[in-house]
Image (cartoon, rainbow, N blue to C red):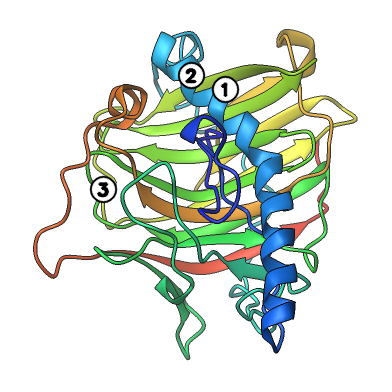
Amino acid sequence: MLIFCRQHGLATQKSGIAIMKSKTKLICGISALIVGVAASAQVATVKTAAQTSKVAALLNGASRALLAPTPMANPAAAATPAVAALPPLDLSDMRMWNWNGKWLASEWDNVNGPIPWRYNHIVQKSGKDTVFTLDATGAPQLQGMNGTPAYTRGLWETEVTLPSLHEGVIVAPLWIYDTGSKDEIDFEFAGRRGLDVSMHVYVNGVHQQNTVRLFAGTDMSGQRHRFGIKIDETAGYVEMYVDGQRVHRWERSSTTSFISHPMKPWIEMWPTNPSNAGFVQWAGQWKGLAPNEKLTMTVHGYGYGYTTIP
């Protein structure tokens, strides 16, 4: 996610910006809880520096120099090969603090915004749709964990009904990330301003970002769409798909930096800090929710697979 961090409030908060990913294990007993908190701090630290530099880049305008309203690519360009219905998210082994499951819903502070991540704001219905809810008490973030392998090749997809898009709210129906290298590829709705597709790479510790804004001026609130990220790191390209149509492609041969590490999927929705100029510039100013208002994003399906990539 535009590496604006999500960081555990119990862990380190470098420069006030972080992507929270605590590694706290809640096992029976107070001593086990303390061990979990220590582990949380260790993992949270991994993403903090990445997020800090990203926001700093936003503030000075450098990191978004490549961001410009861009029309959708030719619909006939290249359809994604996966056309079958996606299976529901497999949350069968998701438990709070279970880092060995396939997925984990976050439960910690979000230093990037006024509302914390809350585990109970991601709920799977009996029909297997998974509902992500943002309200005054919490925001939803789902991350692939130890039970979800990381890859440098393949196709990640989600099928999502988007929430009502609000100024200052980041809606990320799919993004993939490596906590070690900080390689990252994103789909992010930046408030009501459009859909940003981004690639983030750190070269010798220096953050390099390539972002393109799609569908600028188009309100996609409440719409159902399928998002796909297709990668072949060996062949040297990344492709972004919406509803089976390729909307952007990066190639190693034509970029100054390129991803090189296996990544895992994330899905989330969160309000930005309204007093942070970088966030306001990026996504608009968050003005809060009306009394009893909530935003819901429904994930109907998720899939990953190796595929025949042209």
Q: Is residue 81 left or right of residue 276?
A: right
Helix, strand or loop under label 2: helix
- Circle nearer the N terminus (3, 1): 1
Whether residue 56 is visible: yes
Farthest left residue? 291
Mark 3 to mark 2: distance in Å? 25 Å
The residue carrying mark 1 is 53
Q: In this view, does 127 lie above or below 32?
A: below
Residue drawn at (27%, 39%), measured in percent from left and top? Answer: 168
Residue annotated with mark 2 = 56
Dot 3: element: loop
Picture residue at 30% right of the left edge, 22% below the top: 277
Label 1 Cα crowd, 10 Å radius (few <14 / some 14-19 / many 20+): many
**Considering only vertical position in the picture, is 37 above or below 248?**
below
37 to the left or right of 277: right
Q: Residue at x 26, y 64 (%)?
A: 135
Looking at the figure, which quarter contains the C terminus? Answer: top right
Q: Position of residue 150 (x, y in %)?
A: 81, 52
Query: Quick one: SS at disc 1?
Result: helix
Discs 2, 1 touching: Cβ within 8 Å: yes
Question: Of tags 3 and 1, which is closer to the observer?
Answer: 1
Report the disc number at residue 165.
3
Query: Which quadrant does the N terminus fall into?
Result: top right
> Crowding near pointer 2: few (<14 within 10 Å), some, many (20+)?
some
